[in-house]
Image (cartoon, coloured by chain):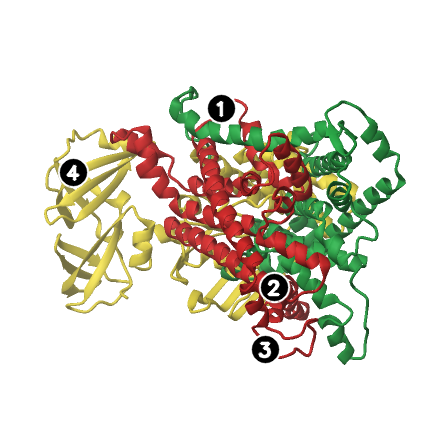
Amino acid sequence: MSSNRTQNILLPIYVGLIFAFVFAPIIFSIIFSFNSQRFPTIPLGSFTTEWYVKILNDPDVWEAALNSLIVSVSTAFIATFLGFCTAYSDYRYNFRFKGPYLALILLPPTIPLIIMALAMLAWLSKIGVSGQLWSIVIAHSVLTAPFAMAIIRLRLHQMDPDLESASWNLGGTEWGTMRHVIVPFCKPAIVSALCLTAAVSFDEFAVSWFVSGLNKTLPVLILEIVQGNIDPQVNAIGTFVFLTSMTLVIVAQLFFLSRQTKSSI
Amino acid sequence: MTEKLVVFDGVEKRFGDFTAVKKMNLEIGSGEFVAIMGPSGCGKTTTLRMLAGLEAPSAGEIRQNGRVMNDVKPHERDTPLVWQSLALFPFLTARENVEFGLKMRGVGAAERKKSALEWLEKLGIGEFADRDISTLSGGQKQRVALARSLVMKPEILLLDEPLSALDAHLVIRMQAVLTQLQRELGITFVYVTHSQSEAFAMADRVVIMSNGEIAQVGKPKDIYRAPANRFVAEFVGRNNILTGTITTLADDAATLSTPQGEFLLDTSATTLRQGEEVSFVISADLVHISLEAPKAENRVQCTLISEEFVGSMVTLFLESSDGHEFKVQMQERELSKFDLRNDAQIWLSWDTNSAHILDQE
Amino acid sequence: MPLPNRPKTTFSAYAMTWRLPIIVWQLIFFVGPVVFMVAMSFFLVKNYRMTEAFEFVNWSKMMSKGYFWDSYWHTIWIATLATVCAMCLAFPAAFALAFKASDNTRRWAIFLLIIPFFTSYLVRTFSWFVILSESGVVNAMLGYIGLGPYTMLNTTFGTLVGYLTLTLPLVVILQTVSMANIDKTLIEAARNLGCKPAATLWRVIIPLSKSGLIIAAVFCFILSFGDFVAPFYLGGSQEPTLPILILDTTKSGQQWPRAAVVAVIMMATLFTIAFTAIALAYRKRASK
């Protein structure tokens, strides 16, 4: 009994430590962004919004933020569209070479980003679309479509397979059924997929750095700042990036989870 | 006086606000085949799990061979359980599954293998010893699960609805296997089920539970003929329950006035009062039928609604003029003497001493 | 869920509308780049310009360089170390979440652990850089109890912290899910057959969650093996890992073909390891 009790005390503490490790960099980054010290440490310096004022007055940051916004929104729509098509094809049809077909969309995340970055850089230069914002969008869509596909596929998995047939039986055409049955059913997953793919794209730096040329996104800007020195501006930009992607991820999860539980009742 | 093999002494089990088992007192003797039966949520599985040490009682004592078992860990007990899901280890072969318990007891590899093969052989699945669990059929898996528990040579074997996943024809076969094994080995079987036919077919004694309480304990026949209360009577089924008020009282007899008519009751075993509301039960197979009004003490005229054939037995479902449902069970060839159509008017009758008065709650 | 029974003749405009986009897109923008990169490893660089060719010179040059092999084994070693650390550190937490926590707590924990996966790894690494520095938070706290200061940056420890930041949440999630999905009656059955609580870990829990655990390890290895941020910023890149090698070769030297050689070797290594591990994970027992 006693070993069980120590387990019941020690294990939660351990879980707490793991979570502390995972969240420490996020929390400290936020704290440091309001800290007056140039080299943040304990005890903390005084509260300041100096770094935020600095980045707000920096046109480079504004430009990077705008670039990031354009890239992540475009990526989200392309990747979610591709993900939806694939998820639906997988759900609805059996066909030859389905294995390779699914591998085609699911493989990219298993390839290290640095390799994808090099391959993308080389290929996009070759076909003449490198060094533009669109280059990043193309690369990010390849990287994030699998996430969209997985989320939408999970949702389709919950759909009664007779739902579609029922709609045809009631006189719906295939296209009408898609519009009035499948898409509405997948809506929460589609919103989740949009948010998550946008979040991944918003944070991605390796591929963006390689293919972006002069069009820096926020993560690329951060990468270039931290290469030189410790600059607390990074914490301010970082906090902004964190908040954006965390919001996207949380919205995505809420959409996905809430609808999931509702539909299972 | 020596105590029975297993004693539940005021055992209670609470999960938060919910009391799964209430103040249970039950004794199980050595070599007995006891079935615990009841609707889902009645506490039967919780009772079994407490016996295996998988749940600790919230109050009371469980004793086995006179020893208080409340705090004994499951792995220190000798109460192997056959699970509803069978719970066979998918990463082990049939033989390795059977060997598992022996391995935990530190039995050597050669001896383990020998005992495991012996048991698999005995249950008629020796040839599948080295097969993966996933490649076996339902019935074969069932036997592996049984062998896995029996190889431990336990004093008591626990079974939690072990046949519920099988096809109907296999259930009958496994019932025979189980009763034969139990007789042969002389092990105590505690068998939890929601199926009346399983419990009544196999058990020496049946425990009927309802809402965490024991509703009745007894031999299958006694429970069938003389259910203790309305719950048991309804749960057991295949009988007719009639309720009314006592109008006349005489020595050893009373007249009960019900919406279905006036019936006589034998009161030699109970005391009833004038005007008391009383229910009695009459087993479906003790009811006679006739087309002419019989000269019986208890009779009622009904309309035939439907017939249900199971093997050579037939059950008639009838309705009295006030809409009360009656059931009559008889041999099919006996029924064929009558020429019955649906809507036929039939007289039902029974002997007064066939009726059993229910305890009033 | 089995696929719904539907006709197999599916060559219709409707079907193709949904099937083709990803094929076209991925062929042009995924297969294209990867194949081109493999081809590029045979190209030549003359006067800082890449010319298409089919020569083995890049391969022979890279393979004969001692620093390449040092870097190769160092990367394998440190990614393996990170995988072992992540698997061991995550296990007790995953165990607690899978078996001790309520369903609700577990859902929340996974919910929280998904967040870092989608938030800027770069900023988190930079945050560690500040926290772990000579005068940073950790050393300041250790100073209060009279320890340190320790050098944590530009060491293997620093690299490991970075790798774990990247991989630990994912490893905890995968381990938790694979253990939470275990049929609890199998654990009870083991106890019922005389298995001690601690022994159920080896006898039941690990065999049952084996494939999930292996997949967690594979992902951890892939992520660590391909990451350049942790070894660069926290490990100081004194011993460059393969990703850093690619970075340097591409960004400074314009030697794309040589970078491609490194990348192809990395991919080959990863695929070999991943396939072996997955084959192990789903290996059927040899039926006698």
Q: What color does chain C have in the rendering?
A: green
Q: What color does chain B have in the rendering?
A: yellow
**Gap between marks 3 and 4 measured at Cα:** 91 Å
Q: Residues within 10 Å of mark 1 (few under 14, many from 20)?
A: some
Q: What color does chain A have in the rendering?
A: red
Q: Residue B268 has which mark?
A: none
Q: Are marks 1 and 3 in contact (CB under 8 Å)?
A: no
Chain of the residue displaying label 3: A
User: Mark 3 — residue?
Assistant: A47
Q: For the residue marked with disc 2, what is the amino acid?
A: Ile
User: Mark 2 — residue?
Assistant: A26
Q: What residue appears at the point 22 percent right and 49 percent down from the top-left corner? A: B351
Q: Who is closer to the viewer here, C59 or A167?
A: C59
Q: Which of disc 2 and disc 3 is earlier in sequence? A: 2
Relative image position of residue A66 (x, y in whole percent): 51, 53
Q: Which of disc 1 and disc 2 is earlier in sequence? A: 2
Q: Considering the numbered disc 1 on the image, is that residue within a helix, a strand or a loop?
A: loop
User: Mark 4 — residue?
Assistant: B304
Q: Considering the numbered disc 4 on the image, is that residue within a helix, a strand or a loop?
A: strand
Q: Who is closer to the viewer here, B57 or C181?
A: C181
Q: Are marks 3 and 4 on the same chain?
A: no
User: Mark 1 — residue?
Assistant: A95
**Gap between marks 2 and 4 measured at Cα:** 78 Å
Q: Are marks 2 and 1 in contact (CB under 8 Å)?
A: no
Q: For the residue marked with disc 1, what is the amino acid?
A: Phe
Q: Residues within 10 Å of mark 2 (few under 14, many from 20)?
A: many
**Which tag is nearer the camera, tag 3 or tag 4?**
3
Q: For the residue marked with disc 3, what is the amino acid?
A: Phe
**Gap between marks 4 and 1 measured at Cα:** 58 Å
- The answer to whether residue B63 shows anywhere in this view is yes
